[in-house]
Amino acid sequence: MPRVSLRGRHLRGQRLRGRRLRGLHLRARGQHLHARRRPLLGVLATLCAALLLASGTPHPASAAAQDAGNDPARATTQAAALADLLRTNPVHVTDQLPRDVPRSAAPDFAKLAKRTGVPTYVLVLPSQDRGDRLLGAVHDRLGRDGLYVLVDDTGVSDAAAYGVRAPADDAFTVSLYELPYDAGPLLSFERFTDVIALGGKKAAERADAARKKSEAAGGDDVEKMHIDPVDRDNQSFVTGIALTGVPLLIILLSPYLRRWIRRQRGPSAKDPRAKDPSAQDPGAKKQQPSSPRRHFTPLRIEAGVAVLAAGAVALGAFLAFHEDSARTSPPPTASDLSSRVERVAAGLKQEGQANGAVYSDPESPRPLDSAQRRELLDRIGKFDRGPIRIALVPQLTEDESGGETEIFVEAVRQKMGAKGAQGVYVVADPLGGSIDVVTYDVRIDANRIAFDLPDSIRYGDDDDRSADHRLGERLDDLMTFLDKSPRSARAETSSLGMDDAPDPVEDEALRPLFSGDFWPGLMVGALAAGLLFGIVAAFLGLLRLSVPGLRRTPATTVAADGTLGFTAPPDPSAGFLRRTARDELDSLAREFDPDAALRSAVRTRVYDCLDTATLLADRDPDGHVDDDATPADLAAAIVLARVGRSALKGNDKPCCALNPLHGPSTGWRDAQYSPDDQRLRTIPVCAQCRVLVEVQPRLAYTLRLTLPGAGRSERVPYEDAPGPLPAIANGVPQLIRQVREYAGVQ
């Protein structure tokens, strides 16, 4: 059912956090073991062992038996059952952890146990509270010397050597400190046996080195070996960010940086007129320019690089994040998943009486003494609404049902066949202390059991610290609760089964890399690329403004004869006019030296141009273009500044009639100046405009300068613009006079 499946996944999702806590607990215990190993105590222990062996006296009773109180049988029953299992096979793997340690992995543990060189007895069990006492009790029951190792779902949890030379504490310390908490039980036991095989001296050195390394790292855990679903989500998210962010950043930033660098370097020092014979000789024949090749333009190259970058990111992420599962052990087989269910079902049948049965898991602590068991069976025999079957078995997220008690009970009931079709099934966890009840075909209100069962029965008291979780008393209270429960009108049956349990392989499988958080990552990557582009552009803009040497060089070309040529679009924006006016004023002020040896006429012309250009663009003057300067004023300032710079180079010709921003002309040509006037007029044109005029004079008007108008898309021909700019048609002196009148300066 969906409810069970989701809960199972939730419980499985909490396992990694539990493993971390368990790892920290084991690490603290390892430090305690290290603190216990004092040289003097080691000598005394050796002497005592020698005396015991010499006298032939048996080993002392285990601490578990000493703590048993009035009923030592209850404390040693688990140890006796485990000793019987080890007597048959020195390596026992429980059937209660098939999702983490399947029983089919027992041959691997047995193979590793042979590396130690001493008799080795391995118990793979659910996590035990006092594993050291359990190992001592098992050794006393088995009566064989050797190395005893206890392994749980996180790794080696306890180890002790009895009558053999084996550095158990050092091997445990190494497996604890050198491996991450998610290494898994099999790898942890492998590291443990490797250190045992080194011998006492080398094992102690390695343990000290591992401990010191951990202390130097501040106690931080070793980097984990496997990823979990959260890590996969992070990988998918980062992959999505990189897959869109990197290509978009290339497409956005590369052209901007290319233009920025070109502006700093300035244009090529060669003027097109140097390669154009007609620029030097107006009578020379103009050759038709060859069509440019556009197969490998910078934009296409950058787009290709962006595509390659996207492919590299996708391939690199696929190769780097190749994990498809979070499993630390081989997947369980069908036999692994059904072994415990069959065992419990067989145990309930064997213990079964007319009205029910009580089955205690032999691998777990026995929470019921003989008197409690007899009393419980007596109350079960008096229950008149159907048989009651009680299973004292752990319920773990690592078991076959994923910790879902109802699924486990349904599987046991099916294995019992017709004998177990009806009744009340009670599952009491001897490790966790919880009690769950499931009913089948009995006239008891299932809702009352599900919702009204007191927490004191279901979970026990919060302040209860007893080893047996007071299960005997709570089961007795449960029987009282069932006796007092009202009869229901009809028999109710649970509909859950093993098919509802989360699949162990699917549960540990990681979702594909290009799924889940990958899609939000794509959007975040696009936003991040735009944000980073804005940051870089703002930084470079501030850098260019704050560092005078990085201010953009005006679009200027130098011909072979030393004269200057200038470029500008026929429809410049207000931003272009503002930037170019600032750069041209800076360049003219930097190039003009009033004390230089210049002809008087040239000095006067340059000074007038600088003065009037400043009046138009920077009236303060504070070195910055005025915010309220109009596009027409900025264009006039550019024209005056470029005329002044050309005058310094000895060029005092009229400005280009089509676009005065191009500076002085290089010759006169017949051209159609206006789209409404079909006549060809002889006008001065620059080298840049002359290329089109000589080939298509009827299209010359398309090069005519227009300025931004009042509307957003409105353009005004420069000769119709407000202000002094139209006076350039009558020559530079007339423009200078008009500017001074316009500015109110005589």
Image (spheres, rainbow, N blue to C red):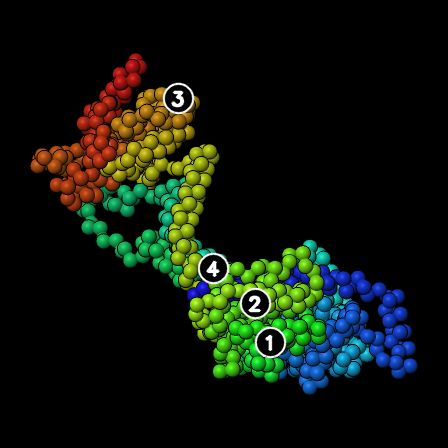
| Amino acid, disc 2 | Asp
Residue denoted by label 2? 483
Q: Residues within 10 Å of mark 2 (few under 14, many from 20)?
A: some
* Along the viewing direction, whichever of 259 and 470 lies nearer the viewer: 470
Residue 192: % across, % down: 70, 73
Q: Is residue 331 above or below residue 667?
A: below
Q: Mark 3 and 2 residues: CB-CB less than 8 Å, in contact?
A: no
Say which residue label 1 marks. Answer: 381
From this viewpoint, which residue is outermost toward the left? 678
Residue at (55% x, 64% y) in the render? 484
Which mark sits nearer the N-terminus, 3 or 1?
Answer: 1
Task: Provide the secondary structure element on which disc 4 rests.
Answer: helix
Give the mark toward the camera: 4 or 1: 1
In the rendering, which numbered label is found on residue 233?
A: 4
Mark in front: 4 vs 3: 4
Residue at 53 percent of width and 77 percent of height: 412
In the image, which disc is placed on residue 621?
3
**Would residue 291 be visible to someone looking at this image?**
yes
Q: Are marks 4 and 1 in contact (CB under 8 Å)?
A: no
What's the mark number on residue 27? none
Q: Are marks 2 and 4 in contact (CB under 8 Å)?
A: no
Within the image, what quadrant is residue 719 found in? top left
- Which x, y percent locates residue 88? 69, 86
Q: Amino acid at mark 3?
A: Pro
Query: Which mark is first along the chain, 2 or 3?
Result: 2
Q: Is residue 262 left or right of residue 687?
A: right
